[in-house]
Amino acid sequence: MDSLVSMRVFCLVAELKSFATAAQRLRISPAMASKHVMQLEKRLGTRLLNRTSRRVSLSESGALYFEQARQMLDSLDEVEAAVSNATVVPHGTLRLTAPVWMANKIFAGVLADYQMRYPEVRLDVDLSGRLVNLVEEGFDLALRATAAPDEALIARLITNVPFYLVAAPTFLKRAGRPAKFTDLSGQALLHYALYPGESFSLAGEHGTETVKLNPVLRSGNETLLHVAALEGMGFAFLPKWLVTEDIAAGRLEHIMPDKAIFTGKLFAVYPSRKYLSAKVRTFIDFVAADKRMK
């Protein structure tokens, strides 16, 4: 039995979590798909898949083998396509991690349009907000808002992301609308936990002006900070994409838009150029070129 074919069968079963669905796509019987995987397990001397009557899942050994095998197969497909002058069609599951605040209409629209263009790619998106280990956890790609990407990874700048200082009208009616930057001193702040301090500095008419706000809520979850701002709990610096509709609808107000603003950078980060598969390359290019992301 061809080992390379068995590897492809195993990877598709692992991605789809189903022998029957994988077999249907490969136009073989479920019994033959199972035979391929069992032959592979016998050759490796370890169980790759945990099987029950209702589900299929990767074993610890299977997860390790899956990531390496998937990268190898993606690379092989690209080499064969290059030799035959064919176009590589992106396929398989793209595992992506991104900030919580990318759960918004703009990014959802980008994902929908990408999947429509490349229907053979299935998107598995993690928006937990935690800093994942791409290699150990089997992610293909991360979108990260950071000033300094991890030097051990490859990073490509996608776009700049403005962060607006916003507050709800109910809060501003109670606390007052700041006319100048120093009016923010001591005001209630919904503090993003990944921002290192509670003081903010801007270049003013008389040099650098610094204000220290009162952190009434601290969280690393931008969704919670967003909802708390809508509830009138305090000021918050939030990504433009997250608050544009709220500002247009009057649910939030953009405070001192010409002064109290800072811009973050959104990078596409991946482990290595060596295994940059078609699905990863096309997704990065697609996102970077989309005007909605600007």
Image: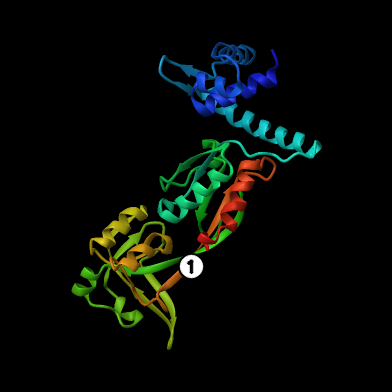
Residue 81 seen from this side? yes
| Residue 194 screen position, x and y as percent | 41, 57
Which quarter of the image is occupied by the N terminus?
top right
Residue 151 seen from this side? no
121 vs 211: above or below: above
Q: Amino acid at mark 1?
A: Thr
Determine which residue is flagged by label 1: 263
Residue at image point 51% right, 19% down: 20
Near mark 1 (Cα within 10 A), the count class, few <14, some 14-19 or many ≥20, is some
- Identify the secondary structure beneath mark 1: strand
Query: Based on the displayed image, in which of its 4 quarters is residue 6 positioned?
Result: top right
Query: Based on the displayed image, in which of its 4 quarters is residue 4 positioned?
Result: top right
In the displayed structure image, the side of residue 134 where residue 177 appears, left or right: left
In the displayed structure image, the side of residue 271 where residue 147 appears, left or right: left
| Residue 165 screen position, x and y as percent | 36, 69
Q: Residue furthest left?
A: 174
* Number of numbered markers: 1
| Residue 108 screen position, x and y as percent | 45, 50
Closest to the observer, 132 or 87: 87
In the displayed structure image, the side of residue 103 where residue 177 appears, left or right: left
